[in-house]
Amino acid sequence: MKIVIAQMKHETNTYSPVPTPLARFALGGEVPPEGREAYAAYKGTGSAIGAFIDLAESAGAQIEIPIAASAWPSGLVENGAYEFIAQRICDAVSKGCDAVLLDLHGAMVTQTYDDGEGELLRRLRAINKTVPIGVALDMHTNFYPAIAEHATAIAGYQTYPHIDMYETGQRAGRAILALLAGKARPAMAWGNRPMLPHVMRQGSDDSPNRELQARCREMERDGALCASVFVGFPNADIANAGLSAVVVTDGDAALARRWCDELLEMAWKARADFVYRIEPLAESLRRASTLADANDGKSGPVMLLDHYDNCASGGTMDTMTVLGAMLDAGLDDAAAFAIFDPQAVQQMIAAGVGSTVTLSLGGKLDMPAIGEKGRPRTVTGRVRLVCDGVFRNYGPMARGETNHMGPTAVLDTGKVEIVVISNHVEPHDLAAFTAVGIDPARKRYVMLKSRIHWRAGLRPLARAVVECAGTGVCTSDYGKLAFKKLRRPIYPLDRI
């Protein structure tokens, strides 16, 4: 038995000015890993492709990994990058196989295709009309009909932060292996609702998504092969952005349809609870100071979330609004992760560790899609550390996977230690801080350019959490997003 296993993952923010060439999908190199290199990169990790490898090996299958391509979210995927990745996968399937297991995202938009995953699956079906195809998808999938039409079994993450990527790969892969063994006949139903949940209200340990994902797990305990609710990714101007659901049963199409509709109705009834209420930044900082000063016996930092500029949602990661407000307010004993500014990093490297430098920090990238110019800030501090920026996640999210921040430096202003990086990496793992010699648990304040994922590895440290509305293409203010392709009417943009 031969199984083709591949990865093609990107969450596309169509408002982001950050380009997405092929090199962005590489693990610190020029092209994504293939074959044995891909196997070594993901074997033993908490990823969906890692689960596929384990399942295939347990089944005694011959494995071919034509490519493992994953990139931090950014703007439209360049056509050359998409064609390179897709062609590798298509070529492998064209040589013949018994099954295909794909670790995809579900919200890839290219310069040509609004549904990058559906286009890949369409091409694979043109090559082989009957080969079973199992697909693992991110919870932020913007689902299109072609995905369901051409896949055999689909499973989506049931946690946000995504700490069940491996388990999702198992769910999708086991359905395909059961089919190959003659023990299951996957039957699938999907649907969506005209609603665009705010990302800041999508956490799976928060209501209403908590209840939706719990119901998915109940359905699987009751016999569904896979049950998934996709909350969708709203920072993408495409027709099908928003919430959807997929249920796969063992041969019972009517039951799949009934369960899928139940999930969609649950979500629709709770639609108002998916709306995020924005707090003014000045008020957020005042509240943070009060929380830090409270004599409540708690330890750990107050986490300040710069959630408008999260690179895991396509942010530039270089806006200075929240960090600037912290500096203006005089917040002391703080750490900030991170500012993307390769130019500033090189200036600090040239100056050397221990030197005092004055930098034009951040604000290098304009954001024309939301009408914002980049606004650098002059910052003076001591270069405390320089490193290569490579670290391996502790987990639970993306356990064992390697991150490449590129050349990295820490600028200490005397009150705030600012991590400055050359490649986009979101701080969802404690290793991001230990790699640069910072113990966040001992800080009074920690600023994170993160929305929800920070909870995976850092929430146990937090004394309190304050969400800060700054500047960026990950804005929770839908009024800043010029939707042109999005299907209308849709809640909460329209009265429904």
Image (cartoon, helix red, strand yellow):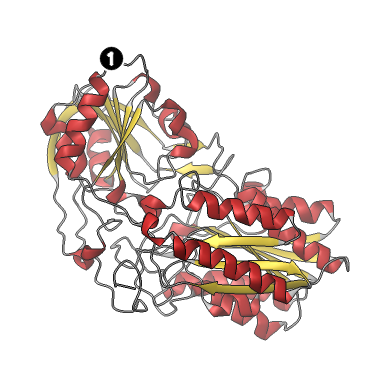
Q: Position of residue 145 (x, y in %)?
A: 55, 79
Q: Give coordinates of residue 57: x percent, y percent.
A: 80, 52
Residue closest to the eye, 113 or 446 = 446
Residue pictured at 36% horizontal, 68% vertical: 236
Q: Is 403 displayed left or right of 63 in the figure? A: left
Residue 265: image location, x then y, percent: 52, 67
Please indicate whether residue 415 sits to the left or right of residue 82 in the image.
left
Residue 205, horizontal then vertical, whole percent: 49, 43
State the SS at label 1.
loop
The image quadrant of residue 422 is: top left
- Asked whether 44 or 484 is in front, the reply is 484
The vertical placement of 337 against 71, above or below, is above
> What residue is rendered at 41% in x and 57% in y?
73
Query: Which residue extends farthest front?
Result: 269
Using the image, determine if residue 213 lies above or below residue 461: below
Placement of 131 over or under 470, stated as above or below: below
- Is 36 on the left-hand or right-hand side of 239? right
Q: Residues within 10 Å of mark 1 (few under 14, many from 20)?
A: few
- The residue under label 1 is 295
Residue type for callout 1: Asn
Toward the viewer: 68 or 463? 463
Q: Is residue 486 above or below residue 468?
A: below
Q: Quadrant of the C terminus?
A: bottom left
- Asked if residue 293 can be seen in this view, the reply is yes
